[in-house]
Image (cartoon, rainbow, N blue to C red):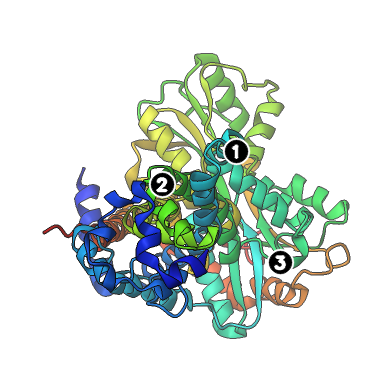
Amino acid sequence: MTFVLDGIQDAWRLLVEGDSTTLHAVCVSLSCSVTAVALAAIIAIPYGAWLGFYRRDSRVQIFCLRLGMSVPTVIIGLMVYLALSRQGLFGTFDLLYTKTAIVIGEFLLAVPLLGTLSHGVASSTDPIVLETSRTFGASRLRALLTALGERRTALVAAGLATFSRCLTELGIAVTVGGNVQERTRTLPGAIQMELSRGDFSRAIAAGLVLVSVAVVITMASHVATKEKRQ
Amino acid sequence: MRGAHDGAPCEYLGNVPKLLQFPIFKTPPTTFRPNGLSGRGSRSSGSVFMTKTTTLRRREEPRVRPHLLLLFVTLSALVACDRGNVARSAKLGSTTSTQNSGILDELLQAFQTESGIRIDVITAGTGQALALGRRGDVDIVLVHARDLEDEFVESGHGINRQTVMWNDFVIAGPRGDPATIRSAKTAAECLKQIAGKRHLFVSRGDESGTHNREKKLWASIPMSPDKQDWYTSTGFGMGRCLLYASDKQGYVLVDRGTWLAFEDRTELRILFEGDAALKNEYGAILVNPARHSHVHAESARQLLQFLVSPKAQRLIDDFRIRGERLFHSAQVGG
């Protein structure tokens, strides 16, 4: 059992000294998931909201979204890998084992999730907001954005849920990112790697960092979406 | 539509009884500014409730603090700008044993200092690393399964194979040695005894160099252990496979490098070593640029040259884990 205590001690030392490998993993994790979620938000939120506001009877499209959400991440990883591999459809772009590849994979993970969540937000919004804006002469898109603006708290929560999902993603990051040290190694990938080489202290360190990042994000979202009541 | 309430908004709205419950109508109509409704030229949040009534409503509504989100996005954007600035690079498909032992980091660091070429390491079992080479996803491979390597070169996927270093496999098992392999003469005999006792044997099962050697040993008995209940195929890398064997107290074929790196974390002992059939040679092969025109052939060639250079060979011979020598240079030993 001593190695666990040693590990926690070493983990603390690595964090305090700012170990470059661990810091790189933090950077890769954050930048990839932020980019992926931001790109996904551009498509998924308007689409999900459109379904929720204007196509309430379209069960097929929402089913497709939910179906996309249920695809296991290793399958997403496999598909992206096959597509980006040299002999794949997009092989010429030389994207395999880059951060771009991770972003693509996490984007595919984020779109159905964020779409479904936005659809949920939209369909739980009182349609009166929409009707009012329409009555005041707003276009359909304008009315939709207005109504979404009224539900920004819920949307931020949906975005953060998607972000956490991407941040903690292991299968995609390792399959298409290749877990290259200081280039495409994310925090979960680092934990996996250190565990496989038996360096428990570094694994614990990476784990502590991942937990801290998650805690910071949760706290930020908690503060950002704080409800102000009189 | 817009013309209707531009002129007389109050009358128009008053005609819609359903909307009367909406809080916006609790304020005097004079505060109402129809221009804000189109959303253009008004404040940026895009809400139609841009009148004084908005202020009333806002106190009740959940509020997003934009500055926090902005800070978050900015920080993330900053860390996103950490793209490496090394111009030349190559991808090396290598095995878990070289990476787990730490020798690869040391060699590649020396190489990058000397040449300025950054090497991205994709860690996989030998079989997978060669598959990556066959697909052209890496530029050079460093693997250890001679049969597969020769096949890789003969089929035209790789060129210029060079032996870089060697060490050996050992068979580790529970301290008590229930299958009594300590007294065995050859590695094949060990496996035969383990099979005879039906004692747990833990296999990599991932087409790695170690797994291939193990399959070769089983085939030399000959027998096929795949469907036996005492035979576990894990799919782990060498280190985790060893830890698995330690937890389950099984026998395992392991390369000496990984063994030394993990020795103090396992409850196992080396029970058999020294058979010629356990010699473990690492070879580097360039991915054939004639077949994959995109490979970073020049960087990869320089890496290969470096790996067999006297400097790298000395690094290999001098590499120690807790005072124990892990690898032998190809030039000196043999």
Chain assignment, label 2: A
Q: Earlier in the sequence, mark 2 or mark 3?
A: 3
CA–CA distance between discs 1 and 2? 24 Å
CA–CA distance between discs 3 and 1? 31 Å
The residue shown at (21%, 42%) is A1
Q: Earlier in the sequence, mark 1 or mark 2?
A: 1
* Nearer the observer, B180 or B263: B263
What's the amino acid at mark 3?
Answer: Asp
The reply to whether residue B273 is in sight is no
- Binning the other alpha carbons within 10 Å of mark 3 as few (below 14), some (14 to 19) or many (20 upward) gives some
The residue shown at (14%, 57%) is A229
Residue B21 is left or right of residue A85, and the answer is: left
Q: Which residue is identified by label 1? A: A64
Is residue A101 depicted above or below B235 in this figure?
below
Is residue B190 depicted above or below A214 in this figure?
above
* Image x and y of residue A24, in percent: 42, 70
The secondary element bearing badge 2 is classed as: helix
The secondary element bearing badge 1 is classed as: helix
Marks 3, 1: nearer the viewer: 1
Circles 3 and 1 on the same subunit:
yes
Q: Which residue is identified by label 3? A: A94
Residue A131 is left or right of residue A108, and the answer is: left
The residue shown at (37%, 62%) is B11
Q: Which residue is identified by label 2? A: A127
Residue B14 falls in which quadrant of the image? bottom left
Residue most extreme to the left: A230
Is residue B283 depicted above or below A74 in this figure?
below
* Image x and y of residue B171, in percent: 50, 36
Residue B269 is left or right of residue B23, and the answer is: right
Q: Earlier in the sequence, mark 3 or mark 1?
A: 1
Marks 2, 3: nearer the viewer: 2
What's the amino acid at mark 2?
Answer: Pro
